[in-house]
Image (cartoon, helix red, strand yellow):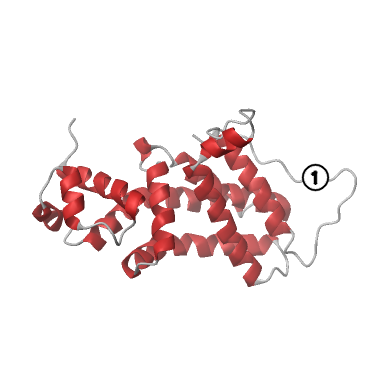
Amino acid sequence: MRPSIRDTLLKSAVTLFALSGYNAVSLRDIAKAAGANVGSITYHFGSKANLLREIYDRHTKPMNARRRELLGEARRISNPEERLMAILRAYVVPAFISSSEGDGGGAEFTRMRAVLSAEGNSDARAIIADAFDETSHAFIDAVAECVPGAPLEGLVWRSQFLLGSLYYALINPERVTRLSGGVIDGNDREAAADQIVKASYASFRSLSVEPAKVDAGSHIPEPAQGKTA
């Protein structure tokens, strides 16, 4: 079935925002790319900011709902180290599940997120905050419960580092393949998610002022296995 003009406008906007950022793209640019007129954008969305808000709603609401569901399950785990691993998977895995064009994600939308986050436009900043701040706060709170005495500064910074690793793994998986000489497949989403979770586990766990005793037989708990896509 042919996509509606509304869907075509949204898709064209994502493509242009991912390439040029929010500030540089006009309503006329979006309309031209979609084969429509500017009036169709104002009719369907009212403004460029409202168009961007709908893009975020369509892409992030399913992902955030899944994150909240998995986070609820993770917080019921009694062992703090296993709980921390499950919390990190609750954050990471939905980003990879929602990383194909068919389910409302895709590398293009992820690239757009990275570009707009760096751009600092006030409209985009408010929309990004509305889309992610609530789940981000819940995630940071859940991690803090697993890492006794961790300073807020460390928790917030390391949550940003985790987000950065997600962006880069989704946007440029080919770099992993190239740097490994083809030994590693950067497009293996399950492997990428597991590696990000393990690295983030070590990063957050080191913040504890009551570090777990490590003996010769101890190790980082393995993430639960399961397809991420």
Point 73% across, 44% down: residue: 221
Residue 17 on image: x %, y % = 32, 52
Q: Quick one: 111 or 92, which is closer to the camera? A: 111
Asked if residue 213 can be seen in this view, the reply is: yes
Q: Amino acid at mark 1?
A: His
Q: In the picture shown, does residue 170 fall above or below 41?
A: above
Q: How many marks?
A: 1
Q: From the viewer's side, name the closer residue of 162 and 183.
A: 183
Whether residue 96 sits left or right of residue 201 in the image: it is: left
Picture residue at 13% right of the left edge, 58% below the top:
42
Q: Position of residue 84 (x, y in %)?
A: 66, 53
Locate residue 209: give its quadrant.
bottom right
For residue 142, which quarter of the picture?
A: bottom right
Secondary structure of the residue carrying tag 1 is loop
Q: Position of residue 40 (x, y in %)?
A: 11, 52
Q: Which residue is mark 1?
A: 219
Residue 117 place in picture, x, y as percent:
42, 60
Identify which residue is drawn at 44% across, 41% down: 99
Q: Is residue 195 left or right of residue 110?
A: right
| Image quarter of the N terminus | top left
39 or 228, which is in the foreground? 39
**Residue 213 falls in image quadrant:** bottom right
Horizontal side of residue 6 vs 165, given as left or right: left
